[in-house]
Amino acid sequence: LPKWKANPVTQPEAIFPKGTAVFALYPQTTCFYKAIVDEVPVHIHDEYSLYFEDSSYPEGYAPAIRIPQRYVVECRESPSGSSRRRSLK
């Protein structure tokens, strides 16, 4: 896991953009699950707001949850090249 937080002001390229597929540590677990970025951190101590995949919801995603930056990591594209962005309302 990353040791440092990205500073959105001085390192905007290190922040995952809204709509990006990521893996994130789900609260109260030790497991990383696939999620979609809902809101990005604005300041160095801010967290991401993420939609975790959850088939029990009609849209396929649970309501957004705030996750610390250090527990959000890249989700690489699959070899098939399928799109990993969710259209957000």
Image (cartoon, rainbow, N blue to C red):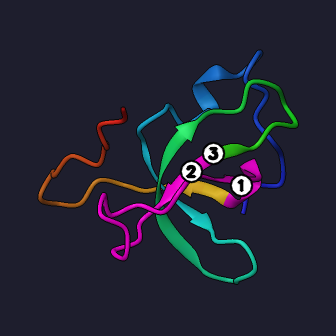
Q: Are marks 3 and 1 in contact (CB under 8 Å)?
A: yes
In the picture, measured across the screen, residue 49 lies left or right of residue 77, that is: right
Q: Which residue lies under the disc numbered 2?
A: 50
Q: Do the residues labelled 3 and 2 touch (CB within 8 Å)?
A: yes
Whether 22 is drawn above or below 38: the answer is: below
Write down the region rendered in magenta: 49-71
Tag 1 secondary structure: strand
Q: Looking at the picture, how far across and down is residue 30, in whole percent?
A: 69, 83
In the picture, measured across the screen, residue 14 lies left or right of residue 19, that is: right
Number of callouts in the render? Answer: 3
Mark nearer the N terminus (2 vs 1): 2
Q: Which residue lies under the disc numbered 1?
A: 67
Tag 2 secondary structure: strand
Q: In which quarter of the image is residue 43?
A: top right
Q: Do the residues labelled 2 and 1 touch (CB within 8 Å)?
A: yes
Q: Residue at x 58, y 55 (%)?
A: 73
